[in-house]
Amino acid sequence: MKIFTTLCCAALLFAGASFAQSRADHMTVRFASPVMVGETRLPAGNYDIQVKRGASDTTILVLRSENGPAIGALATHIADNDLDNEGNASIVLNRKGNDLQLSRVMFGDHTGYQLSIAE
């Protein structure tokens, strides 16, 4: 009985940890044209963007396509003080030559992430 109780507690702990990440750290976007993330070109399509925090202050944005591999990008936490965008998430793309470069990911709670791009 003690083993069964321990297994149930471990299962509840695992399930709680998997759901602990808030919906504010996840969004789905559709890129109408290819987008560069660092040196990687992502084809047009639907992507899930999820925030992954490391043990230190490291933050990684993981972009995962519906039918392809995932890519991770180092990011810095930023705050958006524009109160007109309450509840609206946004993506900021910069033009670099002929390419669109993912620059920022802003969530509806006014938190966001600036991608660290090596020049």
Image: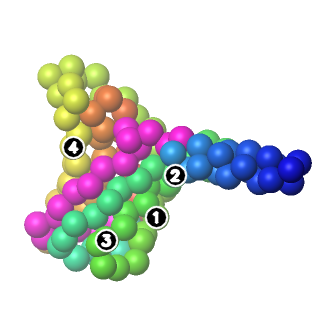
Nearer the viewer's eye, disc 3 or disc 1? Answer: 3
Kindly indicate whether the residue at mark 1 contacts the one at mark 2 (C-beta within 8 angstroms). yes
Query: Where 17 falls versus 99 (above or below)?
Result: above
The amino acid type, in three-letter code, at marker 2 is: Lys
**Nearer to me, 26 or 55:** 26
Q: Residue at x 30, y 50 (%)?
A: 27
Q: Between marks 3 and 1, how big is the CA–CA gap?
A: 12 Å
SS at badge 4 = strand
> Circle 2 is placed at which residue position?
52
Q: What kind of residue is marked 3? A: Ser
Local packing at callout 1 (Cα closer than 10 Å; few below 14, some 14-19, many 20+) is: some
Of mark 3 and mark 2, the one earlier in the sequence is 2
Which amino acid, mark 4? Answer: Ser
Q: Residue furthest right?
A: 2
Residue 64 vs 61, above or below: the answer is below
Which residue bears the numbered disc 3? 65
User: Dot 3 lies on which element?
Assistant: strand
The residue to which callout 1 is attached is 72
What stretch of residues is rendered in magenta? 20-37
Q: Which of the image's four quarters has the C terminus?
A: bottom left
Depth check, mark 2 against mark 1: the one in front is 2
Locate residue 47, reporting x and y percent. Answer: 28, 64
Between disc 3 and disc 1, whose residue precedes? 3
